[in-house]
Image: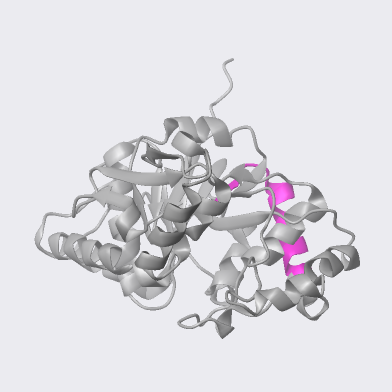
Amino acid sequence: MVPKAPIEGYVYPVYGDLKYLRHAVASATTLRRHDRTRPIALVCEPHHAAELDRLGIRLFDRIVPIAAEHRSIVGFKHHVDAYMVFDRTLFLDVDMVWCRNPDNLWKALSAYPFTITGQVTADSFFGGPKGFGVLRDILLGRRARTLRRFGLTYLSRVQSGMMYAADAALTREVCATAGDMLARKCDTHFQSRTMESGRTEESCEWSLAMAMSKLDVPVHPWHHGQESPQLDFIQDLTEYDPEFERVVCTYYCDPFVFSLRGLKHDGIRRFLIGFLRLFPGVGDSMRVTPYVLHFGWLHQKQPFYAFSERVWAKVNTAKPLAPGS
């Protein structure tokens, strides 16, 4: 008897304001351009499910209720083990646009029992101050002290917009360990994300990164050239049309140069990159279409918001959306 192939599927979590439902619908619409077979689940509150039903939207193959205690970034991502609705589950943020067929991405992810997109080594800004305050952490060796306190030898940088789970037991262990790490926040050098302008929720990422280090669970390469699973949307580093049907990103091969993409002032970023190009190879770049374009930076979200509103307007006037449409 031929064994049954494991079911691969996507999960979008939604809680709070209805605008996040609109974002999930927009993201899932772009996903269906490239993958018409794998199921998509929406984990949401009752009023989100009621709104989908009212509009006759059948874009999601499964609607799963989210527990009240999981309706936050940490609440959900530290408990993804409770929402593994498929044998192989890919958890996604809603502020994402899919740009290409994900078949090869699934092949790459199948090598892991659990993983999150990330980089093997986290820089000093990860979980720390995003300005010059980070110099204090560096000079006082606070990152190294955190690792010693927790018996860790390395700290990865995770980007939890993509979390992959295939082994329920390991996923449960990672989530529980991340919760333990967060409970001991006072023993770390990490600062609350709520201290950043525009942020209202605590970060889940440094605690997940520490849990993965503790359990020696590898990250899946976040910045991986032509095979990058997701890249950040940066206005002047991205070629795109209004519907994001063709997306090409400028990808700097040098990790430090690529890290400058988040600078808010475009002129300063261009000046720094122009200067660094004086050094052979440092300014090398390639044109890349990632699997996903992620609108994670607060000052870069407007094009996705506009796209989301257009998709929602079409949904309100078109015939019902069904899975695979």
The quadrant holding residue 15 is bottom left
Residue 190: x and y in percent read 71, 74
Q: Residue furthest top?
A: 1
Residue segment shown in magenta: 162-181
Q: For residue 177: magenta? A: yes
In the image: residue 36, left or right of residue 133: left
The tally of labels here is 0
Q: Quadrant of the N terminus?
A: top right
Judged from this view, the residue extending furthest toward the left is 317
Does residue 130 appear in the picture of this structure? yes
Res. 37 image quadrant: top left
Residue 243 screen position, x and y as percent: 20, 52
In the image, residue 9 above or below residue 197 = above
In the image, 222 versus 275, the foreground residue is: 275
What residue is drawn where x is 46% and y is 40%? 284
Residue 86 seen: no
Q: Which residue occupies 62% across, 42% down?
A: 166
| Residue displayed at 41% across by 72% down | 298
Between 162 and 90, the one lying in front of the other is 162
Pick the residue in front: 308 or 51.
Answer: 308
Residue 300 location in percent, x, y? 35, 67
Quadrant in the rendering for residue 265: bottom left
Main SS of residues in magenta: helix
Q: Residue at x 22, y 61 (%)?
A: 307
Q: How is the image coloured?
A: one colour
| Image side of residue 301 versus residue 78, left or right | left
**Magenta-drawn stretch contains 138:** no
135 relative to 275, above or below: below
Residue 249, horizontal then vertical, whole percent? 35, 46
Q: Return the residue nearer the eye: 149 or 102.
A: 149
Say if 46 sits above or below 114 in the image. Answer: below
Whether 269 is drawn above or below 225: the answer is: below
